[in-house]
Amino acid sequence: MRGKMPVVTTVMAGVMGVAAGTWPAVRAAASGDEGPSTRSRLGTVLADQAWERPRPGSWTPPKPAPDGLPPTISRIVTQDKVVFLTIDDGYEYDAEFVDLVRKERVPILTFLTSRYVKGQGQYFWALRNAGSQMENHTVNHLNMALQTPEKQKREICGASDTITQQYGRRPQIFRPPFGSFNLTTRKMAKECGIKSILLWSAEFYNGTSGPGVGFNGFARGDGGKGFRPGDIVLMHYRKGLAQQLQMILGWIRQQGYRPAAVENYLPRSLGGNAPDQQPATPG
């Protein structure tokens, strides 16, 4: 995603061109190809994290779609003052950011465009172990609504195949580039093992300018101000991401909110970690 609220079947201009490339195996990256500096900076952040789960009865799990295809989700209905930080693409790498995520224990969810990883498999392995699941953002960051069914399937399944090979878990949540998709996208996503499509309700234009909000601005899709419980916030892997994360964490805390792991608010049938039937609220 880049600087737009989600739209369905809308033509988006300015698709970023990136030279073709494939991911090396993680073991190759770890063997020394990236040099001792990268290894030493990332070596301290390899520690698995587990995120706090919501209280029973404090949120309403998203529902499956009536047509049996992956439903689209742009916000979680919850009583908790939580927001969900989701970060797209992956064409910039900031070891300081990985360290910050781990030290501050910040839940994030990565939507990875597999073409952008190139030689940085170890970077995203460190992020995975800092607590971020790797979910699907296609191979080449194309506008899905403009592609043939066959092309859409290659983009979604190809990214899932690579992420599975590199990080040991097949993505179950999909974010279409630019928030642009159609019925065919949902059908192809299901064939690739996707259980839900996660959009967003607000965007932090970290490291860039957003329409009407300026550089490092924040905008809600509904035109309101500030955060709302259950907001899904879109960010991107850009230069200076560590400082940008500190900025939005300050805003979140000033308004009495905290980041939470969106996967803990999604039922397993939709690709999350929550049970499909909520336990009864304690009396």
Image (cartoon, rainbow, N blue to C red):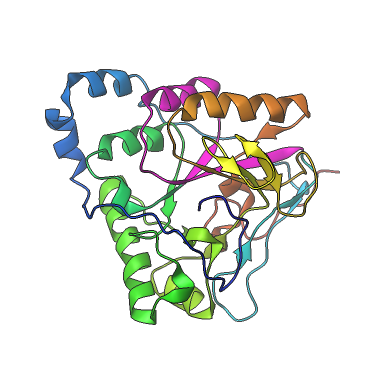
x 80%, y 47%: residue: 224
- Residue 228, by quadrant, is top right
Residue 108's place in the image compared with 185, above or below, is: above
User: Whole-percent x and y of residue 256?
Assistant: 78, 28
**Number of numbered discs visible in the structure rendering:** 0
- Residue 155, by quadrant, is bottom left
Q: Is residue 217 left or right of residue 178?
A: right
- Residue 261, by quadrant, is top right
Magenta highlight on residue 228: no
User: Whole-percent x and y of residue 218?
Assistant: 67, 40
Q: Which residues are magenta?
A: 81-110
Screen quadrant of the C terminus:
top right
User: Whole-percent x and y of residue 49?
Assistant: 47, 31
x 34%, y 19%: residue: 44
x 70%, y 30%: residue: 252
Magenta highlight on residue 82: yes
Comparing 149 with 49, the one in front is: 149
Residue 239's place in the image compared with 41, above or below, is: below
